[in-house]
Amino acid sequence: DTGVSQDPRHKITKRGQNVTFRCDPISEHNRLYWYRQTLGQGPEFLTYFQNEAQLEKSRLLSDRFSAERPKGSFSTLEIQRTEQGDSAMYLCASSPPVSGTDTQYFGPGTRLTVL
Amino acid sequence: AQTVTQSQPEMSVQEAETVTLSCTYDTSESNYYLFWYKQPPSRQMILVIRQEAYKQQNATENRFSVNFQKAAKSFSLKISDSQLGDTAMYFCAFINSGGSNYKLTFGKGTLLTVNP
């Protein structure tokens, strides 16, 4: 079990550029989540996948944000026309296909800085 | 909507001593789960301990234990024999049980510093 991985770990971009982040969940975890964490705050939920289906999107996810999980394995989060307010840590988590609490296991995050 | 409140932005403790971090939450649900996650500086978030709301017994994991008071909607974390490696941001989190349980709601965190 190699844990949740995210790539890149850091991304610096200029305002208006598009960026894409990747998340590889723990193998056999069919649930995948994206959260955003700004400085001094707890993570905030962005979106949730069960297998390849995106079942929930937060109101925080504006039209400039899109997430995919095409084959039910890795997921990508794309931000178009980045703004300085998008600067944050983007966390990915996964959980196994069992009933009950389904503890979420987090990746190391991608820190985005928009200049 | 569920909310999680951590009223202590920062705390410090001497190595080997005991410290308690506070968390309160608000929900209308009866079945849910509570978690404490630890986020060391520049490192990823890891699960410390979890509690099922239907269990009366408080969860324990080695030096970490919780005091779960369901009626008061309180969920505090006690760290015994604090170690330097316990220095981290600690987040209390809540999730509903049931078919739609997917969204963790976090508090703002408590920064714990363990001093030598």
Image (cartoon, rainbow, N blue to C red):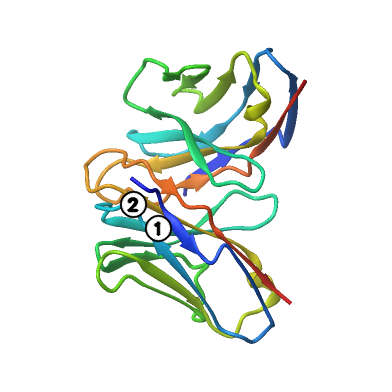
Q: Is residue B72 above or below residue A44?
A: above
Give the labeled residue for mark 1. Answer: A33
Instruction: Point out the image quarter for the C terminus of chain B.
Output: top right
Q: Position of residue B87 (x, y in %)?
A: 67, 31
Give the labeled residue for mark 2. Answer: A26
Label 2 secondary element: loop
Q: Position of residue A113 (x, y in %)?
A: 68, 70
Q: Residue at x 47, y 52 (%)?
A: A107
Q: Residues under labels 1 and 2: Cα distance? A: 12 Å
Amino acid type, callout 1: Tyr
Residue B91 is drawn in which quadrant? top right
Q: Residue at x 55, y 40 (%)?
A: B4
Neighbours of disc 2 within 10 Å: few (<14), some (14-19), many (20+): many
The answer for which chain carries disc 2 is: A
Q: Nearer the viewer, residue B60 or A107?
A: A107
Q: Position of residue A2 (x, y in %)?
A: 37, 48
- Decide which of tag 1 and tag 2 comes sooner along the chain: 2
Neighbours of disc 1 within 10 Å: few (<14), some (14-19), many (20+): many
Q: Position of residue B47 (x, y in %)?
A: 47, 36
